[in-house]
Amino acid sequence: MPLEITPAAPADDALYALYELDEAVDRGADLPLFTRPAHLAYHRHPPPAQEVRYGLARLDGELVGYTTLLFPQRDNLRTVEVGTVAVHPEHRRRGIGRALADFAVAEARRRGRSTLIGASARALPGGPARDPAGGAFARALGATCAQTEVRRRLDLTAAPDAAPAAAATRATTAPDSTAPDGLAPDGAIADGAAPDGARGGARAGSAGYSLVRWALRAPADCVDDVAYLDGRLLVDAPLGDLAWEPQRLDAARVRANEHRLAAALRRPYNVAARHDATGRLVAWTQILCADNADGHAWQQITIVDPAHRGHGLGLLVKVANLRYARAHEPGLRVVDTFNAAENGHMIAINERMGYRPLDAWENWQRTLD
Ligand SMILES: CC(C)(COP(=O)(O)OP(=O)(O)OC[C@H]1O[C@@H](n2cnc3c(N)ncnc32)[C@H](O)[C@@H]1OP(=O)(O)O)[C@@H](O)C(=O)NCCC(=O)NCCS
């Protein structure tokens, strides 16, 4: 039987087989492989406002590779994100990757998309080895590197506290507004709990701001501000030459994303800073946990509204959130985060917290004629 590339949607049973394939693909030994339930739940519950399609490559009926394509539905209507192109190591250099890329291009054209964006890892001097295949493959397909990000890791086993004392004493926590969290997957985050005992405290450096935290579901009076701050991310973060446009976010989409994270068995932890004078959230950060054998989590979003920069809020919310997550995730060992290589302010905060470079991730972009 020749090579076959067939489309699949997130609900298809065929996606069960991706777990075995992902186990075999070199993700970089230090990237987490989620437990099977977490893996399947993630594939079955894609992000809101995205159409997700898979291309499955079968050789003699055996699944040997796949690609994941995300088509934004509310913004970035000319772009497709290539979430994955992966080929089983025993079947490489036989044109399967190229066939998956052809599938991606055909799906993009069918939907009127002209820009494809995807990423691959590259080793950094002194860092762990990385297979150069991804970059070579992207280049061979005519993509160019539009931006480089660096993945940094905070090793909590090496730096057990991982919170600079200066930042810790700045923290002041408002009456905890952790929502009565109907969506919490395991109820682990008690309503109103203050896991780090951080209520009150010195206000130096953060006078006029209070911390708010929640797990899955943002408090009702925060959700519009979360949408605003989330929407700023693709405006404010350095994007290099990447053709991403700002996302269109509103409260409904924030809620839809919360539902999706719960369904996908992800456990988010959020801390925001509220500007006392206006009552608005002006800084926000998120850590995302999911079951894996490595005690691994992702430090995701961190954003400070431009009018409130220079007050140490970025570091403040990140340190508070790390404590919040650790208090509820006793198995947490390492936290990874991505930053654009040119994002000096964010990198300085991360380095201060103990994050150290691990590898580089090149964001590849290909524009169709
Ligand atoms: C990258 C990957 C998908 C390539 O799959 P593949 O089936 O081996 O790709 P193909 O055989 O279609 O290769 C297409 C071209 O890419 C280039 N290429 C692929 N792997 C390469 C390697 N290891 N070294 C140098 N060039 C390479 C070559 O130009 C190749 O053409 P050629 O074989 O005629 O010389 C596969 O190595 C993989 O799954 N890697 C891990 C995940 C990853 O990095 N994904 C890519 C993200 S951009």
Image (tube, rainbow, N blue to C red):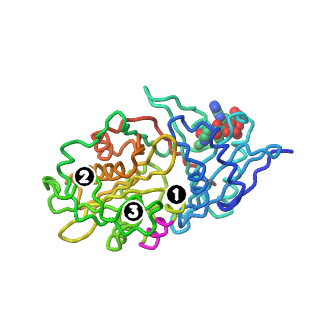
Query: Which residue, given by chain and number where applicable, does mark 3 sit on?
Result: 230
| Residue drawn at x 15%, y 55% as measured from the top left | 201
In the image, the residue with mark 1 has its CB under 8 Å from the nearest atom of ligand 1: no
Query: Which residue, given by chain and number where applicable, does mark 2 sit on?
Result: 316
| Quadrant in the picture for the C terminus | bottom right
Q: Which residues are magenta?
A: 251-259
| The image quadrant in which ligand 1 is located | top right
| Near-viewer residue (184 or 236) | 184
Give the mark toward the camera: 2 or 1: 1
| Quadrant in the picture for the N terminus | top right
| Residue drawn at x 14%, y 59% as measured from the top left | 207
Give the residue type that dot 1 points to: Leu
Q: Is residue 183 visible?
A: yes
Alpha carbon separation for disc pair 3 and 2: 18 Å
Q: Earlier in the sequence, mark 2 or mark 1?
A: 1
Give the mark toward the camera: 1 or 3: 1
